[in-house]
Image: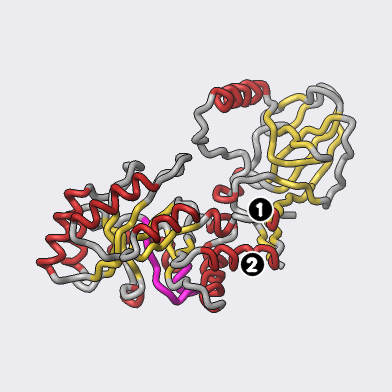
Amino acid sequence: MALTLTVDGDRWRQHLRAVAEATPGLVPVCKGNGYGFGLGRLARRAGWLRDQGFDVDTIAVGTYEELPEVAQRYSGDLLVLTPWRPFGAALELPAELSGRVVHTVSREQDLVDLLGRQPGARFVLEHLTSMLRHGMTGRQLRTAADHLAGARAGRLEGIALHLPLAQGSHLGEVHRLLNDVVAAGLAPTTIWVSHLTPEELATLRASYADFRIRPRIGTDLWLGDRGALRVTATVLDVHEVDRGDVFGYRGRTAPKAGHLLVVSGGTAHGIGLESPTGDSSLKARAATLARGGLDAVGFVRSPFTIDGKQRLFAEPPHMQASMLFLPHGPRVPQVGEEVEVRVRYTATGFDRVLVS
């Protein structure tokens, strides 16, 4: 009676090996909900890749709070993607992890503060990209380089670039950013980069032979072969209804005769919670308006598939279950059957993850 992620283990592991083999310097990203698998499982799998002989000596986590869960399951280095700040969990790093953790530094003053607190700290300097999220400008990189030359403290592990997901080649922007790195006197060094295609990575390595390129990869690694993944929910109850029958928390009425299905999976799992989309096309906007209109009258397409079609929510999802309306016509599942669910893995928490 659960929302379950079932993984074809052989196929999934084959995909992981293929990505690792094609990606020298791979840095697996293990953050958030672990892309649906859980942080601990991904940390162990990254260690498995290293044991297979692949160049996986570092994994990346999203925040300092995630370090304890992965550190005990992976023995290599741990890159923290959220920039270091002189407050919060960054100052609560256990002493036994200090030698393994690589901090991200995105402000000049933070570099001074970090080295003042931890003279032996390991860190990368984040260069500001067109994302405009975190990072130093080219001028600030030069100032940071001057400070490092004078301080003779810490261990610079390279430069971090977090590129946007926008379509089109990133190479022009990366060339400009690496020119800033060279101008700051920080080359040769290691470049930790995200969201470059294999072709872009190959071009970058050929153009900058003095740099070591380390791709940080999460989605394409863990979720790159969706055919190896299957999400199902359990049918918990089935109720036949006639038109006008009252049901649910909000006392709604059935629009026609059919069946109400209660299935596992609700808001606690992420069901029915939709992240904002980056698609700004006219078609996407029209779809949003259509969904809003459906919601106003109580009809919203759910992610649950029955008889080959995504069925409508009968009412908004409950915390751990959802009510679906199934009109007469399709086959009615029995209690205990499993139905397919379409989810966004990074926003879904599963009751069970079964890897064969």
**In the figure, 178 relative to 95: above or below?**
above
**In the figure, 57 relative to 323: above or below?**
below
Where residue 280 appears, x then y in whole percent?
Answer: 50, 29
Pointer 2 or 1: first along the chain: 2
Packing grade of label 2 (10 A; few <14, some 14-19, many >=20) is: some
Does residue 204 appear left or right of residue 330 in this picture?
A: left
Give the image's coloring scheme.
Answer: secondary structure
Packing grade of label 1 (10 A; few <14, some 14-19, many >=20) is: few
Residue range in magenta is: 70-81
Residue 21 is inside the magenta segment: no
Residue 71 is inside the magenta segment: yes
Task: Give the residue type at disc 1.
Answer: Arg
Q: Which residue is mark 2?
A: 13
Where residue 15 appears, x then y in whole percent?
Answer: 62, 63
Does residue 327 appear left or right of residue 46 in this picture?
A: right
Residue visible at 15% across and 65% down in the picture? 148
Task: Give the residue type at disc 2.
Answer: Arg
Q: Quadrant of the C terminus?
A: bottom right
**Image quadrant in which you'd find residue 295:** top right
Query: Marks 2 and 1, how far apart in space?
Result: 13 Å
Residue 226 disc label: 1
- Evaluate whether residue 1 shows in this view: yes
Does residue 37 appear left or right of residue 193 in this picture?
A: right
Residue visible at 62% across and 26% down in the picture? 291
